Image: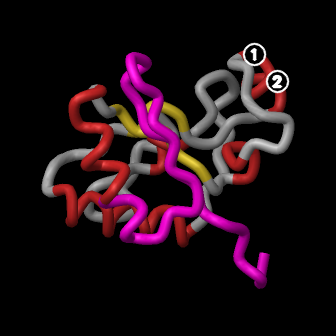
Amino acid sequence: MINDFRLSPHFKLCEFQCRCCGAVKLSPKLLDMLEELRAEWGAPLIVTSGFRCVPHNNAVGGALRSTHLDGRAADVFARPAAQLSLRRAAELIGFSEVICGGKRNYIHLAIERDASE
């Protein structure tokens, strides 16, 4: 796998690539905040959706201006029983969007665009 290398202690680039085309965009700030959340949570965070190209975003019913389109969002696996506590931890760290997926077993985590972007 071409993007199978570590970006940080707990995440590889391939975890964030588009599932349909393999392209990847990733905000360094998102990666830093995911690492911080991983440390706070004390358990692995499994990325189920990172960057999405426009066709893939459309295919999965993503928002027209989804933060996945520019590498500012990741969905991570979370069973419904763990979502509330993971959401609280993510909000304390400062994620701008924290949306629980309920029975779909994920939490959407996103950050605001930096002024420098």
Could you say where residue 63 lies in the image, as x and y percent from the top left? 78, 34
Residue 17 is marked as none
The structure residue drawn at horizontal position 59% and vertical position 50%, both measured from the top left corner, is 73
As for residue 97 lying within the magenta part, the answer is: yes
Q: Mark 1 belongs to which amino acid?
A: Ala
Q: Does 6 sit left or right of 19 as displayed?
A: left
Residue 65 horizontal/vertical position (percent): 83, 44
99 vs 84, left or right, is right
Amino acid found under the numbered disc labelled 2? Pro
* Residue depicted at x 54% and y 71%: 29
Q: Position of residue 99 (x, y in %)?
A: 51, 41
Question: Residue 22, position in %: x, y?
Answer: 63, 33
Q: Do the residues labelled 2 and 1 touch (CB within 8 Å)?
A: yes
**On screen, 31 above or below 29?**
above
**Does dot 1 land on a helix, a strand or a loop?**
helix
Q: Residue at x 21, y 65 (%)?
A: 39
Q: How crowded is mark 1: few (under 14 residues within 10 Å), some or many (20 or more)?
A: few
Disc 1 target residue: 59
- Outermost residue on the left side: it is 42
Q: In this view, does 80 lie above or below 59?
A: below
Please tell me whether residue 107 belongs to the stretch shown in magenta.
yes
Q: Tell me where the magenta segment starts and ends, as one range.
A: 89-117
Residue 10, by quadrant, is bottom left
Answer left or right for 46 relative to 52. Answer: left
Q: Nearer the viewer, residue 116 or 2?
A: 116
Secondary structure of residue under mark 2: helix
Residue indicated by mark 2? 55
